[in-house]
């Protein structure tokens, strides 16, 4: 990216240079990553650590990420940054013990964001599940129609569900009796 002298000056004015990490002191994303907007350079806000990398090292190759050695998302110190793939990032996270598991897992700490626990872990099943489109009567009808020779696609279309959902119902993988 072509960073102007004015942009560079504005960028570094938002950084507090400590003895270790250089902290981004302007806007941060909910995850703690520094963000900077410069519409004349880029149409959407940019991650500050990626900008810091480019200011020091040049363009980031396609498919690579700028990762933190220090695990501080607000850090923009080039010495704390390195390039890697998503697999490298996952390996680094696991090696440092930052993988959320057990009660720290996001499925438990933020059930409202987990598409597989739409009922927030209440354990409700069948038609009592808040996201259910079907009733037990519908499920019984789906199974009857399948046994009578109607294919899964026709059933799915008739009940407004996916082919996969229809398949899981007729095989007993979901809506278990």
Image: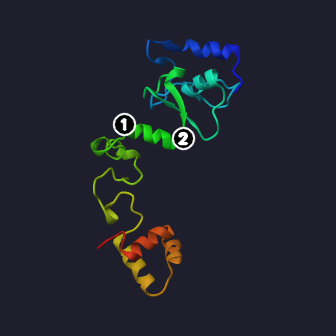
Residue that carries the numbered disc 1 in the rendered image: 98
**Crowd rating for badge 1 (residues with CA inside 10 Å; few <14, some 14–19, many 20+):** few
Q: Determine whether the residue tagged by mark 1 lies in a helix, strand or loop.
A: loop
**Crowd rating for badge 2 (residues with CA inside 10 Å; few <14, some 14–19, many 20+):** some
Q: Is residue 135 left or right of residue 1?
A: left
Q: Position of residue 72 (x, y in %)?
A: 43, 26
The N terminus appears in which quarter of the rendering? top right
Residue that carries the numbered disc 2 in the rendered image: 85
Residue 83 visible at all: yes
Q: Is residue 102 left or right of residue 27?
A: left
Identify the mark nearer the N-term, 1 or 2.
Answer: 2
Q: Position of residue 169 (x, y in %)?
A: 40, 73
Q: Determine whether the residue tagged by mark 2 lies in a helix, strand or loop.
A: loop
Color encoding of the figure? rainbow
Residue at image coords 34%, 65%: 127
Residue at image coords 58%, 22%: 52
Q: Position of residue 53 (x, y in %)?
A: 59, 25
Q: Between residues 156 and 8, which one lies in front from this camera angle?
A: 8
Q: Between residues 114 and 65, which one lies in front from this camera angle?
A: 65
Residue 138 visible at all: no
């Amino acid at each position: 990216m072509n960073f102007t002298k004015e942009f560079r000056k504005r960028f570094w004015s938002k950084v507090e240079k400590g003895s270790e990490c250089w902290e981004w002191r302007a806007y941060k994303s909910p995850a703690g990553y520094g963000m900077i907007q410069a519409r004349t350079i880029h149409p959407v806000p940019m991650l500050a650590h990626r900008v810091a990398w480019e200011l020091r090292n040049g363009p980031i190759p396609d498919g690579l990420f700028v990762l933190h050695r220090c695990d501080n998302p607000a850090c923009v110190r080039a010495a704390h940054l390195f390039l890697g793939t998503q697999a490298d990032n996952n390996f680094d996270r696991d090696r440092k013990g930052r993988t959320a598991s057990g009660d720290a897992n996001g499925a438990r700490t933020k059930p409202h964001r987990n598409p597989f626990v739409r009922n927030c872990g209440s354990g409700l099943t069948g038609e009592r599940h808040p996201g259910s489109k079907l009733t037990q009567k519908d499920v019984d009808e789906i199974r009857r129609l399948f046994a009578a020779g109607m294919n899964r696609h026709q059933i799915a279309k008739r009940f407004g569900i996916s082919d996969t959902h229809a398949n899981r119902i007729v095989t007993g993988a979901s809506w278990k009796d």
